[in-house]
Every structure is written in structure tokens, then in C-alpha cells.
């Protein structure tokens, strides 16, 4: 599959391509759900169902497993329920 060039859609399926210890689980070759790109850190926030944890990966640490813009059914409801934390005083 193609490498990331432009931030893919929220909910796009990805596969981690590097050894990465995510709270005791090596997520290399595991599928995740891309949620958000952070311009400040230049990393992508990705949720992994294999252990229910979140990782911040650089674009050279994963590849797309679906075509750009396609959100698999298994992630549609999940990403619809996620909101960015809003701070209030």
C-alpha cells in the first residue's frame, strides 16, 4: 500500500511497520485506526484495538491498509464517538 503523503481521513485503517512497544505489546504489523494528525508534533494519533491503547506515530512508522479516504465499517462508529478534549475554566 502507498505511504502517507497527505493526512488521510479520520478512521482510515493503517498498519504499523516498525517494532513499537505500546504498553507491553509490540504493535508491528498490527492494524490501527487513524484518528488525528498533530501539526505541532508532526505525528498521527492512532488507536490500536489489539490492546485498546493509543500511539503517536510518525508517517514513516506506518502504512495505509485501505485506499485513501476509505473508512472501514469497523471504525465508522468508533471515530464518530471521539471528540477532542476541550478545556474549560
Image: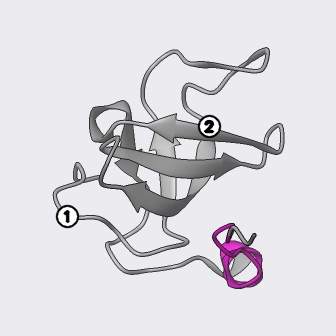
Asked whether residue 63 is drawn in magenta, I would say: no
The residue lying at 51 percent from left, 38 percent from top is 56
Viewer-proximal residue among 6 and 2? 6
The Cα–Cα distance between marks 2 and 1, rounded to whole angstroms, is 22 Å
Secondary element under disc 1, as helix, strand or loop, is loop
Q: In this view, does 83 lie above or below 31?
A: below
Secondary element under disc 2, as helix, strand or loop, is loop
Asked whether residue 85 is drawn in magenta, I would say: yes
Viewer-proximal residue among 66 and 86? 86
Which residue is label 2 attached to? Answer: 30
Viewer-proximal residue among 8 and 3? 8
Q: In this view, does 78 lie above or below 38?
A: below
- Residue count near mark 2 (Cα–Cα under 10 Å), binned few <14, some 14–19, many ≥20: some
The residue lying at 30 percent from left, 54 percent from top is 39
Report the span colored magenta.
Answer: 75-86
Which residue is label 1 attached to? Answer: 6
The residue lying at 57 percent from left, 50 percent from top is 46
Q: In which quarter of the image is residue 70?
A: bottom left
Badge 2 or badge 1: first in the primary sequence: 1
In the picture provided, is 78 more to the left or to the right than 86?
A: right
In the picture provided, is 41 more to the left or to the right than 32?
A: left
| Identity of the residue furthest to the left in this view | 5
The residue lying at 20 percent from left, 64 percent from top is 6
Viewer-proximal residue among 24 and 73? 24
Amino acid at each position: 500500500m502507498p505511504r502517507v503523503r497527505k493526512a488521510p481521513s479520520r478512521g482510515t485503517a493503517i498498519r504499523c511497520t516498525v517494532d513499537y512497544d505500546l504498553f507491553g505489546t509490540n504493535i508491528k504489523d498490527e492494524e490501527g485506526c487513524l484518528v488525528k494528525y498533530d501539526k505541532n508534533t508532526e505525528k498521527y494519533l492512532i488507536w490500536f484495538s489489539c490492546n485498546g491503547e493509543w500511539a503517536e506515530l510518525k508517517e514513516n512508522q506506518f502504512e495505509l491498509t485501505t485506499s485513501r479516504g476509505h473508512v472501514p465499517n469497523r471504525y465508522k462508529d468508533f471515530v464518530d464517538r471521539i471528540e477532542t478534549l476541550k478545556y474549560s475554566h
